[in-house]
Amino acid sequence: MNEGRSRHGGDLVGAGLVALAAACFGTLGPLSRFAGDAGVDSLTLVTWRAALGATVVGLFIALRVALGGARPRSARSLPVRDRWFLAAAVVANMLLNLAAFIAFERITIALTLLVFYLYPAGVAVASVLWFGERLDRTRWVALGVSLGGMVLVMGGAGTLGEIDPVGIGLAFLAGLAQMFYVLAARHGFAHVPGPQAATITMAGAATLYVLLGLGLGTAGALATPLASSASIVPVVLAGVIGAGVPTLAFITGIRRLGPSKAAIIATLEPVVGVGLAAWLLAEQPAPIQLVGGALILGAAVLLQLRPGATADHEAVADPAR
């Protein structure tokens, strides 16, 4: 009897952690707008976010080691294949966040998130083409529902202003990067523990952002968040609440709850993002877009209801670890 209660309690804790992670990730759209209004450009914001997120997870790893936990794996102990995929995941993480945050500035947060959440369908197709998985009836239905939702979202965008092809393209690019990231996390660097993979990918992305700023001659803008509280507060929140904390919460939650249930709960992210945009920024989606968004999220859930399906966000490696 006590054992059953323990398992049930673990489910509740795991579900709560995944819901917390989804809600935290959903704050990034409004935070990007507040940072932008304070003069912080997208490159500066993603640089600070990645660096602060890596710091938070790195401190967690250090604390765990100090308390007698497992030490991070050395690069030499990893298979060469894992190292290459981890390096590619750093680039994907960099493109994902930079494209998404620029899209937040060009189109509405709702439209960005709904286009981005086409990526589960992309994962299904890529799994067939690259990993020999069969596209069964469930996946065909999910793909059709997802594409139908995309048509409704695009068709209703006129009520929110002129469609910006660049913004939509960037949101789609972010989805493609996430698609690769999920596949790499599942098939490419499974030997890297989740927190360590999160630290490496976020720290690596921060380094690439700094190099990009140097190449563009805009590195001086990285100090912009220090100019005022209006600029530093949303940047720090994006790094801590929008990166470090939710990454740890999701990694912990997916291990307690299981990957399939965690993935379904994680689809709260765009719902929270759209809700916050409507509340804080008065970005009211049109009814047809709400229907389209529901179809896209429904497709994401349908894909995850398949036995053995998993989902990853921000460097969740092997859910069993």
Image (spheres, rainbow, N blue to C red):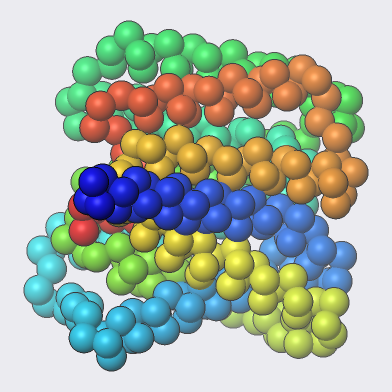
Is the residue 122 above or below the residue 77 in the image? above
Q: Judge left or right: residue 175 versus residue 291.
A: left
**Residue 172 shows in the view:** no
Residue at left offset 62%, top offset 40% = 270
Side of 269 where 208 appears, left or right: left
Q: How many marks?
A: 0
In the image, what residue occupies the spot 33% across and 86% down?
62
Question: In terms of depth relative to the viewer, which is nearer, 301 or 168?
Answer: 301
Q: Does residue 11 appear left or right of residue 242 in this picture?
A: left
Please determine whether, in this image, residue 132 is positioned above or below residue 17: above
Locate residue 239, reporting x and y percent. Answer: 60, 71
> In the current view of this chain or complex, which residue is farthest to the front?
1
Looking at the picture, how far across and down is residue 94, in whole percent? 49, 61
* Whether residue 17 can be seen here: yes
Question: In which quadrant is the C terminus drawn?
Answer: bottom left
x and y, in percent, of residue 158 in the image: 85, 24
Q: Is residue 48 above or below residue 227?
A: above
Of 57 and 4, nearer the camera is 4
Q: Where 176 falls versus 101 (above or below)? A: above
139 or 122: nearer the eye? 139
> Is 201 displayed left or right of 216 in the figure?
left
Query: At 49% from the left edge and 22% from the top edge, which residue is drawn?
Result: 299
Find residue 107 and report its horizontal and vertical position in percent: 77, 42
User: Could you tell me which residue is drawn at 32 percent across and 42 percent down?
Assistant: 259
Residue 41 falls in image quadrant: bottom right
